[in-house]
Amino acid sequence: MRFRLIRPTVPSTLHLYTGMSYSRPVREGIEGAHFDVAIIGGGINGVAIARECALAGRRVLLAEKHDFASGTTSRSTRIIHGGLRYLEHGDIGLVRESLRERERLLKERPHLVRPMDFVLALPTHGIKRSALAIRLGLWLYRHGAGARASTLRTELAKFEANLDRGLHLSLFSYEDAQCEYPERLVAEWVSEALQSGAVLRNYTQALEIVVHEGKARGLRVRDALNSDEFEISADWVVNASGPWADEVLHSSELVQQRLIGGVRGSHIVLPVFEGAPVHALYTEASDRRPVFVIPWAGQILAGTTEVPQEETPDNAEPTPAETAYLLNAVRRLYPHAGIAASDIRYSYAGVRPLPYRPNESLSVISRRYLLHDHLENGVAGLISVVGGKLTTAAALARNCARMMGIKAPEPRVTMAAAGASAEIENTVAEWSRKISKIAGISTRSASALAEWHGRRALCVARMASKDEVLQRPLCMHSDHIVAEAVEAMQQESAITLADILLRRVPVALGACWDDECSVTAAAGIGLALGWSERQQRTELESFIEERRRFLHPAAVTRLGPSLSESLFTQRTC
């Protein structure tokens, strides 16, 4: 990798955009304020609860110690599924709820949640399930989703040709959905909660749940941006901190039974290899644990493992054994692809906040979420969220609101039709045409905006149309533009460069990304937002370090002293 250092040149049109206000919004003071609901944790569950309560007209505060969706949410397998595995375990209620919520997301967020064909590949010999039982289970699964069948059946023979035939696999097709970027879903819910009057604070740690006379009365928090510590009062406190839920309770000296049995799930990301699946593959590893191999972000995502996480979730990272386990699962299916450990682009791990069940096997612990009312522990007005997943976050939020006496009507369900994929493509294409015309940008960039921002993309396009700096690509390989970074700051509570590139406009998760891309993006975003060269350098270095800690890339290129002297660099491609 080579860098060519170029000192910044000032465009002749500088006066057109330096006068425009792209600065970070000032956060209002909330010390001593009263809220109807105070929420700890800004993952998908916490943000969904904040949005639901705000839409009901309640005054809401959410405190997240890092950034929204930066924990378990961004470390998931990125699928929105009904839970075929839960059907096998007899949890019909969870499957029914998951399928219903999947259909709602397909309808409400078609740009982010899309139908995906799955292939269930199971060994023909040595298993207890018969082909008839599997087909019956899949029929029930499809029936629960409105009798929509997969369109993949005619392609199974072609799919099978790329697998190792020596494994004697039986293939079955079904349909679920993928949310490539759940970070974007959370960003949209953050924006909607803010528009409904909620106060959502990232980089704000809940230090203590204030309890007085057997009632949760509020929170003591620390704002990491200015180190201020203060208290707020609240009628209800919701502990939605996921795998950190017990830590939050212990820090408040609320001694009670352990709620969370953290389970680490690791993933590896590979480049697209010869014969790689173009549809999602759901199979079993050598120990019969379920494993997904899924096309994702121009790459192949494989996961996940199930390992008890005894340390704090802050330290969750894939172990060499987990990485080898997942790599072997892929190589077992594609032995002729020549995949080696050196091909792993990066790996990441998250901690699932499953219920604490020390005497149960991890594989049989229910994935159903629980809302624990601490009244039984002598503390009124406090709810802790246990479990949950991407698919059921909105349902969890409605049920949590109802526990607090807040009206949360059940949304109307309209089952997706068989032609849902074509309908989605037509919708995105229509949005793209409008965006391209408004902003004067390429149809590829317009399509990229539509796919990540939905109808909000029109607002981003109008902003971009007024400023040529905002129309620039975030990196040389990307169709996403600087205007999206400004939108992230102004409407989606992004604070840092990492917030933007990893969670609001997550181009840094893509196949192209390297340190050169990081430098290019930092320069463009910094220019638009009016960052000083020192601030840009600091943001860039912090972003690269955060990305490294999140993704654990196999090879890391670090910024040398000469490179950090200037952020205005260009790629030599």
Image (tube, rainbow, N blue to C red):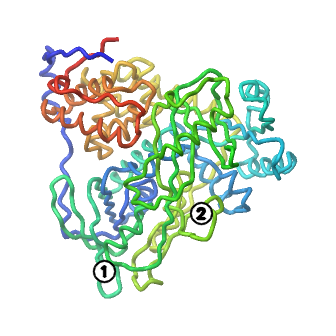
Q: Which residue is mark 2?
A: 368
Question: Is residue 247 something that shows in the picture?
Answer: yes
> Which of the pair 456/488 is nearer the observer?
488
Image coordinates of residue 4 in percent, x first then y, are: 23, 14
Secondary element type, mark 2:
loop
Q: Residue at x 16, y 32 (%)?
A: 530
Q: Residues within 10 Å of mark 2 (few under 14, many from 20)?
A: many
Image coordinates of residue 1 in percent, x first then y, are: 33, 18
Q: Is residue 311 left or right of residue 131?
A: left
Secondary element type, mark 1:
strand
- Total numbered badges shown on the rendered structure: 2
Residue situated furthest bottom in the rendering: 213
The image shows residue 195, relative to residue 245, as above or below, that is: above
Question: Which quadrant of the figure has residue 77?
Answer: top right
Question: Which quadrant of the figure has residue 60?
Answer: bottom left
User: Cβ–Cβ below 8 Å for labels 1 and 2?
Assistant: no
* Lower position in the chain sequence, tag 1 or tag 2: 1
The image shows residue 491, relative to residue 514, as above or below, that is: below
Q: Which residue is mark 1?
A: 211
Q: Residue at x 35, y 11 (%)?
A: 573
Question: Which quadrant of the figure has residue 325?
Answer: top right
Residue situated furthest top in the rendering: 573
Q: Rounded to the nearest whole Å, what is the CA distance between mark 1 and mark 2?
A: 29 Å
Q: Residue at x 18, y 65 (%)?
A: 229
Image coordinates of residue 66 in percent, x first then y, are: 31, 52
Q: Residues within 10 Å of mark 1 (few under 14, many from 20)?
A: some
> Which of the pair 408/385 is nearer the observer?
385
Q: Amino acid at mark 1?
A: Val
